[in-house]
Image (tube, rainbow, N blue to C red):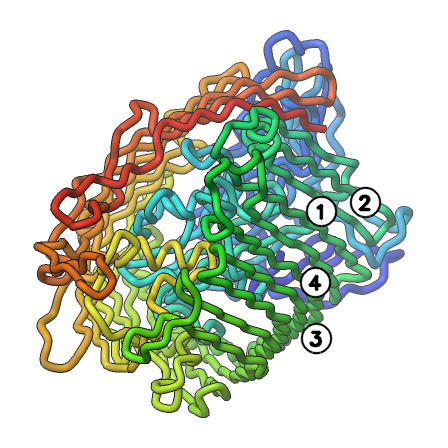
Amino acid sequence: MLSAWAATASAQDLLAPAASAPEAPAAHVSRPPQLLEFIETAHPVGREADASAVLLSVVVGIDGSVESAEVVESGGADFDAAALDAVRRFRFEPATIDGVPTRARIRYRYVFTVTAVPTPPAPEAPDVDAASEPAAEGDAAAAPSPEPEAVHAELTDAEIPTFSAEGVVEPPPRDAITRRIEGDALTQMAGTRGDALRAVELMPGVGRPAFGLGVLIVRGAAPQDSQIMLGGSPVPLAYHFGGITSFYQSRLLDGITFMPGNFSVRYGRAVGGILEVDPRDPRTDRPHGFIDVNVIDASAMIEGAIGPHLSIAMAVRRSYIDAILSALNIPGLGVAPAYYDYQATVAWNPDSSNRVRLLMYGSDDQLVTVSSAPANATANASFGLDNQFHRVQLQWRHLYGEDVQHDISASLGFDLNQTGAGVQFRQDRTQWPIVVRSEWRARLAEGFHLVAGLDLQVTPFHLDIVTQSQSGPTQTTARATDLHLHRDDPIFRPAIYAEGQITIAEILDVVLGTRLDLYTEIGQATLSPRVTSRLRVSDQFSIRAGVGLFSQPPDIGQLLQASASSILGPAWAVHTDLGIDIRFPTEHLSFQLDGFYKHLIDRVVAAGPAGGGAFGGALGMELASATGLSFTGPNTRYANTGLGRIYGLEVAARLEPGGPIPLIGFLSYTLMRSEWLDHPGEDWHLSPFDQTHIFTLALSWQIGSGFELAATLRLVSGNPYTPVTGSVADLGSGAYQPIYGAAYSARSPLFNRLDVRFQKRFSIGDVGIVLYIDIQNVYNQANQEGVSYNYDYTQSNPIPSLPIIPSLGLRGEL
């Protein structure tokens, strides 16, 4: 997937022109990476008599090190592993754009030979120095191929040069802080069940959700303050029940990009952070696929080319916990969670100037009946949930020469949330979101780039919320619990943005941008200027800074409260960041240190005590975000009276592949304070998402011979909650009403958990067999998520977190 200023250089651009090939448009790549150090590796044990070749996609960093490498065309699982191990230790002279070192992606073919192979003469304009390396001799020889290659759709098979290259150049980050995970690291970390989106939990600033629900808590902000995007389109729910797995097949992703603050103006309608999920195009070298079966769910995927310019990938996953529990027919169990998801990608690349991609994906979570109800059950005790969303998204990228690029994306969706609890509560929310994005990127002069775009969201929706007392409608207005809310108005949210990037003396990048949003549901517009900068002190050391203004509209459920809807406006946040980056390329080690401060203005708050009840505070908000339910009372009123301040320090270290030890690792620590003020005249208090200390250490060890071991340790401060200090009897209802202490003045104990993942890979010809076990909470730590009380609030008990969860699985790969 090409990024801003990205370009694909055909063989004619990178090598001596071929007379028989049509002229390709000029590319932004002034010079592709040049191989400086080739690493020779032996044949896999037992395969010394076999020849093979592995085609790899390699990302070369600005320091010339290999940031990531992944197999595009397999030569067999054991050869793949050997080639990856060698290529990750390659050293390059980095690609440059007008003399400035830049990240680049190339394709490199690593060839294992049995006998000496004559090497063709190197071209006059070499792409990678490996092209001229002689093949090693002997039965265990491993040689670089003279064919780092890319298929160019504008050429016929006869016209494609025998030696060509592809260079994909990414721009300097436009955000004050951007963290990205790609390649093998996405699926290798313990505790994620190989799920890419769970890998974001390894990054600093990411809080721990209750019960592992999978909601995104960024730098002490509420889950609804952050957005998860796929291809520029927001996703309503990123994870299935309990956050066990995400909605998108990880092996169809190019990577994930996390922006905890001060993100680009191309993103809006959020005051927290942004997680961008990047899908990849299907592979075209040959058919690929897998079938994965574990104790929780089963999944399958297939991909490959169906023509010279067309490729397709399809994947599906279905859980079967409900089927197992239904077969057991446990009395009184009633319902159990069930989920499925699907993805399909069609990529069409007719020439070097155009790329078209069609994405179709969806997710469904339900509570289904698994056993007969007990004899004393009533209709009032039943509970049902159906949460689903579906998307069809069309993307088109067109390059106008070497300086202008246009991206257009259109997405149509269907969202459904149906929840019910007997006759007391029913919610039916249906949406048909339409998202259109159009973005122009241009290089207007040397060292100056401009980005301008349109971001349009139109959401027709239907919403019904009905609540009533157990015995029917109440007669006393003062104690009414009955409510019927209904709305069918479409939401129209257009936005335009512009951003300029200036490079000064090849060491300082300054990005100035602004965004104009219109929220028709509240009849208000917001203007959000932002600025970020990056100073490259050396190849190993850089300094980042940023400040910006961000806005977010109120939720539709909040607007439905009639008494407050006319005065509700957007919430605001001011983000400030200062950070440094340090890289040690020879050790494949990098560090980041960031300080941040966020000030929240006009935060939407509800009347009443903060965090009351077992489902108040963080737990209630996270459940609401993960299920679509509302845990506030039916007559809750809202207003923009809240303030907030969130500040802290983040430290991150990353051990990249190819270093002196066979480990991939992440270490992060966040020291943070998140505080809220709800109403004028009140005191500041901790927010329900204040997790003062967040420590994560994740390591993955490539042992060799197909063995892999990973472990993740997480230590996190417990969530604050509002304690109950007493109670009074309500003589009218016969129930006890709690008396709350100071807001969020108590805190659950320290959360600690160790996850372990072990896998063994076997090879049978071109088929790989992977046996794995992923164990969450290995030592079955009894962590606490909250507190529950008895009927008169005289006794309390901790609400336990998830116990040990082992997941044993088998995956077959083609």
Q: Which residue is mark 2?
A: 305
Disc 4 and disc 3 in contact, CB within 8 angstroms:
no
Q: Circles 1 and 2: CB distance less than 8 Å?
A: yes
In this rendering, the answer to whether 79 lies above or below 363 is above
Q: Earlier in the sequence, mark 2 or mark 4?
A: 2
Give the foreground label among 1 and 4: 4
Question: Which disc, if any, is residue 476?
Answer: none
Q: Amino acid at mark 2?
A: Ala
Residue type marked 4: Val
Q: Is residue 798 visible?
A: yes
Q: Residue 251 lies in what quarter of the image?
A: top right
Q: Secondary structure at mark 3?
A: strand
- Alpha-carbon span between mark 1 and mark 4: 17 Å
**Which residue type carries mark 3?**
Tyr
What label sits on residue 282 in the rendered view? 1
What residue would you read off at disc 4? 392
The answer to whether residue 280 is above or below residue 183 is below
The span from disc 4 to disc 3 (Cα, nearest Å) is 27 Å
Judge whether residue 587 can be spotted in this image: no
Q: Secondary structure at mark 1?
A: loop
Quarter the N terminus occupies: bottom right
* Mark 1 or mark 4, earlier in chain: 1
Q: Nearer the viewer, residue 449 or 777?
A: 777
